[in-house]
Amino acid sequence: MELRCIQSPTLSGVPRNALSGKPYSCCKTIASCPADKRICSSSTRFMYSDSRARVKAKEKSLANYIVASSDVGPKDDHLVFVAGATGKVGSRTVRELLKLGFKVRAGVRSVQRAASLVESVKNLKVENEGEAQYVDMLELVECDLERTDQISTALGNSSIVICCIGASEKEILDTTGPYRIDYKATENLIGAATSAKVSHFILVTSLGTNKVGFPAAILNLFWGVLIWKRKAEEALLASGIPYTIVRPGGMERPTDSFKETHNITLSTEDTLFGGLVSNLQVAELLAFMAKNRSLSCCKVVEVVAETTAPLLPFEDLLTKIPSKLP
């Protein structure tokens, strides 16, 4: 009997004298057992199932945070549903919400993709000993926002919804991406949130939404992404839900350390034409808005960060943005 590798496992546990003498390469014999033996001796046994065991262990660990999407009850004022929770803005928003004492229901297409999110939350340190670990306040729920039958139950008893989804720029050849994700999937979430009577819906779109000319024309080369983001904004405005629309500047280049040299500045809608801001700065703003709904209710906010801007509390910045509350 010959034991063959399927993947490229670590060979540190295989004795040198157990190898066949030929250099190791995938799909080559790496250890031989006597033909008349059904079980290899311990010196030549190769445990190639280790990687599978690690995958199962990871799945078991993630299973601790999965909640049934049918958990619906009275609204929990401290529970926030985050759509796009494994993305750059979404994952940071989850962590910032937890730091502010919220419980978070992270909406993900695949629980397996949430492994890094869970690990990052586990690494957060609580300020005082004896307090609940942040990871204990995190829930995972699988939900495809393109399937309307999954959304209402996925929201559960969340009182706040934060939507951070967007078509991936890596899938540039998908001409339908911005329409399906930035508009229709977001519209589906808005519809479910309306039916569920959530207390507040925070939507992240983009600077340049509702504008023509440069740089909006350049961004719209990505299959009309800003057009579809504007359609999503219009759907939210028409829903009647208390809302906040956040239009950040470019977030691709700034790292989390961007905030050390650039301070956030907020402007009213259709004011800014360009600018940069980090994912972390946007996430911190979103979490603050969720915690201070009276300051952010019914506002459209454009956000960038600048070296010349003074460092001001979010409260002061939001107070200057007029509310459209009837």
Image: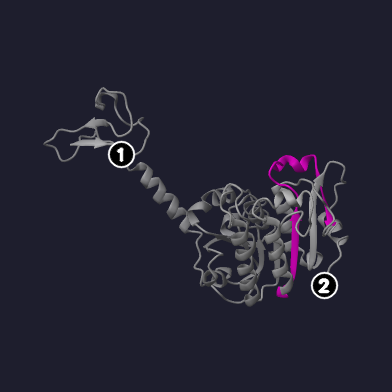
Q: Which mark is residue 47?
A: 1
Residue 209: where, in percent of width, then height? 75, 58
Q: Is residue 91 left or right of residue 143?
A: right
The structure residue drawn at horizontal position 69% and vertical position 70%, both measured from the top left corner, is: 235
Q: Is residue 51 above or below residue 13?
A: below
What element does badge 2 sit on? Answer: loop
Q: Is residue 81 left or right of residue 287?
A: left
Give the residue type at disc 1: Met
What element does badge 1 sit on? Answer: loop
Q: Nearer the viewer, mark 2 or mark 1?
A: 2
Residue 184: where, in percent of width, then height? 61, 65
Q: Is residue 151 above or below residue 315?
A: below
Query: Is residue 260 located in the magenta-colored stretch of the structure?
Result: yes
Residue 43: where, in percent of width, then height? 24, 31
Which badge, 2 or 1, is on the more N-terminal residue? 1
Give the residue type at disc 2: Leu
Is residue 133 visible to us here?
no
The structure residue drawn at horizontal position 67% and vertical position 73%, both measured from the top left corner, is: 198
Quadrant of the snapshot with the N terminus: top left
Instruction: Estimate how packed mark 2 is, as few (under 14), some (14 to 19) or many (20 or more) residues with alpha carbons within 10 Å.
Output: few
Q: Is residue 105 above or below residue 88?
A: below
Quadrant of the snapshot with the C terminus: bottom right
Q: Is residue 109 left or right of residue 97?
A: left
Q: Which mark is residue 325?
A: 2
Which residues fall within the magenta stretch?
239-267
Q: Which mark is residue 272?
A: none
The structure residue drawn at horizontal position 58% and vertical position 76%, both measured from the top left corner, is: 73
Count of marks placed on residues: 2
Residue 211: where, in percent of width, then height? 79, 57
